[in-house]
Image (cartoon, helix red, strand yellow):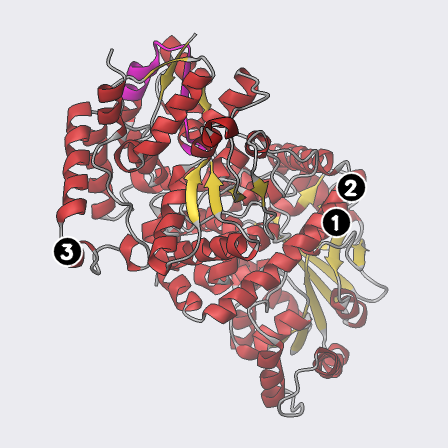
């Protein structure tokens, strides 16, 4: 089902749509207050963008450097060309240690690779430990946002879910009570897990540090308790120097949630005594995307989710309407690169208002790329026949003044004289909820020629 | 200095009063204006649907029609933005460079080129200002709420020159109205919902008139207003700036 239909279904519950819109707008406003408190904000964005652009241009060098430094620190480094390779590598590590239970802290990459299902099919129990992630895992649905995975759910929904799965009191909706229940439930899992998996926000090439930014501290808890720790990262997560990190930690938390910094910024360098530490570096379409002129800098993304919070379409259609791991504006420019046939409607799920590009902490020209994807999709014949013919017909009419004037005149004439039922019917999508303009008796041109005789 | 007046296709066909207001306003300011009768459209509707390479004949026609003017002025941030930023797909030529560089939205032409400091206009109404996105974030006619820096709006500045205008404050100062060209038809549910939300913001803050620099936003919003019978009317900013002065009204 296309985004437009999914969105219509979401909006059918208007009160809930308003609630969803307002919940995300609240985050956008928090982000505004946090960023507007820094006079150097635009400078930071510029630095963030430049550092990322530089890194992407020298990605081979920095990836080699980070892998060498990590290996020197005692980390076992793996390279995965795609999702399948990633999952097999992780499974291989777990098999070697005969791991039956793992805990995982938020990683969009493992979501992208479908790691949970893969491991579960191999008989390994996977528990997502971040509250939002755990909620959607219990509901057996994908995240609807990359930072706030359960933002589509109300506390009543969570109360009901926890009552069914964690045996909390029926009808309980108090967030404190529900969170405490989740804590107790997760604590047991932390203690039993034989391995912990986390994502990586930044991998510092010069030191080999793997930096993980979280608010709940679950990544740390998992990593500290389990003998085996596995960090999975997309290859674009590398940054050159330790000193670059400060730019991104300042940008990331403010953009994501309006916090000055995440509660935990953990730098993982080496395995704990007696433990084992793995780094899996994943391509999965990224290097191909790097080769796409006009689209490559989407790989600058630091996964803050600010473009989702600001997007007026995302807020009113929900993350699931995008039917992809990464929804919203950034998802709409990344997903067509990974699977054009599945996602070619996403670049059209935008008014090109440009708010996403202005909110982006690393200055990805998101709305410009949406525009470029539209051209790409048209040029590859992926637009519907009606649209393609419409474009060509419009070009014929609009490049011939007399034809344009005739078409305009006929259109206005028909609109003024046709009975309402002929104009407003199910073929007129505009008119389902909106009136068409009242056709004036004469065009501006006609008026001009009468009133400004040359 | 001769200005070539560019009246976007849908304004020409459906909102001639916006074209008239633009023309009369420029004439009031002693600008020599000509309306080249062969003009049609900038091609944005097709390009935003993905067909810029299938619209080059329309682009070329635009360049041919307007290249003889010192400035090309349109009452539309969106169409201006399109000509300036997206005509780079045409082969380079002097005429193309000239047209892209010299095409101005009415608001920026008034503020940046004519440097208008006063207007003889009177409009005693509560007005809500809609910041059309392509003007705001494309042409930077104002400071978008996402960005950190000095707050300004060229539209608000001009509106402030009109006597009697009481500008209402909005809860969301620059959220998109949901028009988005063909988006209004391909994503009708979201488009309509966005429009309704914009209108609610203006109405709850007491606006009688909703104004913008782009008639396309207003066409969408007006369509909703009329269907729902809301107590709000839409006017292009040019129509407000072109109102007669107070003394004229009194006599």
Label placed on residue A422: 3
Residue sitting at 79 percent across and 48 percent down? A72
Residue B247 lies left or right of residue B74; in this view the side is right
Quarter of the rendering containing residue B51: top left
Real-space Cα distance between discs 3 and 1?
53 Å
Residue occupied by mark 1: A34
* Whether label 1 touches label 2, CB < 8 Å: yes
Quarter of the rendering containing residue A161: bottom right
The magenta segment is: B60-78
Query: Is any part of residue A248 visible from this angle?
Result: no
Q: What is the crowding at mark 2: few (fewer than 14 residues within 10 Å), some, or many (at least 20)?
A: some
Q: Is residue B154 magenta?
A: no
Residue A273 image offset from top left, x and y in percent: 86, 64
Q: Is residue B70 magenta?
A: yes
Chain of residue at mark 2: A
Residue occupied by mark 2: A38
Q: Are marks 3 and 1 on the same chain?
A: yes
The N terminus of chain A is located in which quarter?
Answer: bottom left
Q: What is the crowding at mark 3: few (fewer than 14 residues within 10 Å), some, or many (at least 20)?
A: few
Residue B213 lies left or right of residue B142; in this view the side is left
């Amino acid at each position: 089902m296309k985004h437009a239909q999914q969105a219509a279904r979401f909006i059918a519950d208007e009160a809930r749509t308003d609630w969803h819109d307002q919940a995300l707008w609240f985050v956008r406003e928090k982000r505004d207050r946090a960023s507007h408190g820094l006079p150097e904000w635009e400078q930071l964005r510029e630095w963030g963008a430049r550092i990322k652009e530089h890194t992407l241009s020298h990605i081979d060098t920095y990836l080699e450097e980070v892998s060498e430094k990590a290996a020197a620190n005692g980390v076992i480094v793996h390279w995965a060309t795609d999702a399948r390779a990633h999952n097999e590598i992780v499974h291989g590590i777990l098999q070697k240690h005969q791991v039956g239970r793992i805990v995982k802290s938020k990683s969009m990459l493992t979501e992208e690779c479908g790691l949970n299902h893969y491991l579960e099919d191999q008989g390994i129990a996977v528990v997502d430990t971040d509250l939002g992630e755990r909620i959607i895992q219990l509901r057996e649905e994908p995240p609807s946002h990359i930072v706030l995975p359960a933002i589509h759910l109300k506390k009543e929904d969570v109360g009901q879910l926890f009552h069914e799965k964690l045996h909390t009191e029926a009808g309980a909706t108090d967030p404190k009570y529900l969170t405490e229940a989740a804590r107790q439930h997760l604590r047991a899992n932390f203690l039993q897990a034989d391995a912990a998996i986390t994502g990586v926000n930044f991998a510092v090439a010069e030191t080999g540090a793997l930096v993980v930014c979280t608010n709940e501290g679950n990544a740390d808890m998992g990593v500290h308790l389990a003998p085996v720790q596995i960090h999975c990262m997309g290859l674009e997560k590398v940054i050159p120097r330790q000193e670059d990190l400060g730019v991104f930690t300042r940008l990331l938390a403010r953009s994501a949630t309006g916090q000055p910094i995440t509660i935990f910024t953990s730098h993982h360098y080496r395995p704990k005594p007696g433990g084992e530490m793995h780094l899996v570096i994943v391509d999965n379409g990224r290097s191909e995307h790097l080769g796409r002129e006009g689209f490559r800098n989407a790989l600058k993304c630091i996964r803050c989710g600010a473009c989702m919070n600001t997007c007026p379409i995302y807020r009113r259609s929900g993350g699931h309407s995008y039917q992809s791991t990464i929804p919203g504006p950034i998802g709409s420019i990344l997903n067509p690169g990974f699977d054009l046939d599945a996602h070619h409607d996403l670049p059209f799920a935008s008014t090109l208002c440009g708010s996403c590009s202005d909110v982006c902490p690393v200055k990805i020209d998101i709305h410009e790329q949406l525009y470029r994807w539209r051209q790409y999709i048209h040029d590859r014949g992926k637009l519907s026949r009606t649209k393609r013919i419409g474009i060509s017909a419009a070009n014929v009419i609009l490049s011939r003044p007399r034809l344009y004037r005739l078409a305009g005149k006929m259109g206005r004439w028909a609109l003024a004289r046709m009975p309402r039922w002929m104009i407003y019917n199910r073929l007129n999508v505009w008119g389902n909820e909106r009136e068409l303009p009242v056709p004036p008796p004469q065009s501006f041109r006609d008026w001009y020629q009468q009133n400004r005789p040359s | 200095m001769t200005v070539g007046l560019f009246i976007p296709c849908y304004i020409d066909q459906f909102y001639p009063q916006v074209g008239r207001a633009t023309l009369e306003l420029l004439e009031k300011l002693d600008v020599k204006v000509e309306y080249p009768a062969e003009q049609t459209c900038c091609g944005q509707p097709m390009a935003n649907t993905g067909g810029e390479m299938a619209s080059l004949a329309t682009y070329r026609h635009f360049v041919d029609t307007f290249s003889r003017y010192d400035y090309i002025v349109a009452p539309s941030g969106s169409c201006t933005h399109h000509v300036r930023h997206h005509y780079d797909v045409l082969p380079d030529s002097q005429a193309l460079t000239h047209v892209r560089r010299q095409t101005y939205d009415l608001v920026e032409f008034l503020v940046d080129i004519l440097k208008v400091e006063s207007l003889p206009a009177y409009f005693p109404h509560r007005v809500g200002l809609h910041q059309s996105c392509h003007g705001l974030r494309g042409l930077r006619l104002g400071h978008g709420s996402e960005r950190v820096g000095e707050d300004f709006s060229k539209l608000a500045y001009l509106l402030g020159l009109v006597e009697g205008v009481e500008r209402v404050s909005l809860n969301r100062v620059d959220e998109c109205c949901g028009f988005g060209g063909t988006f209004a038809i391909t994503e009708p549910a979201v488009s309509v919902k966005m429009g309704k939300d914009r209108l609610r913001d203006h109405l709850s803050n007491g606006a009688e008139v909703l104004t913008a620099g782009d008639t396309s936003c207003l066409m969408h919003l007006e369509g909703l207003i009329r269907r729902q019978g809301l107590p709000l009317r839409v006017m292009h900013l040019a129509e407000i700036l072109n109102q007669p002065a107070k003394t004229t009204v009194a006599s």
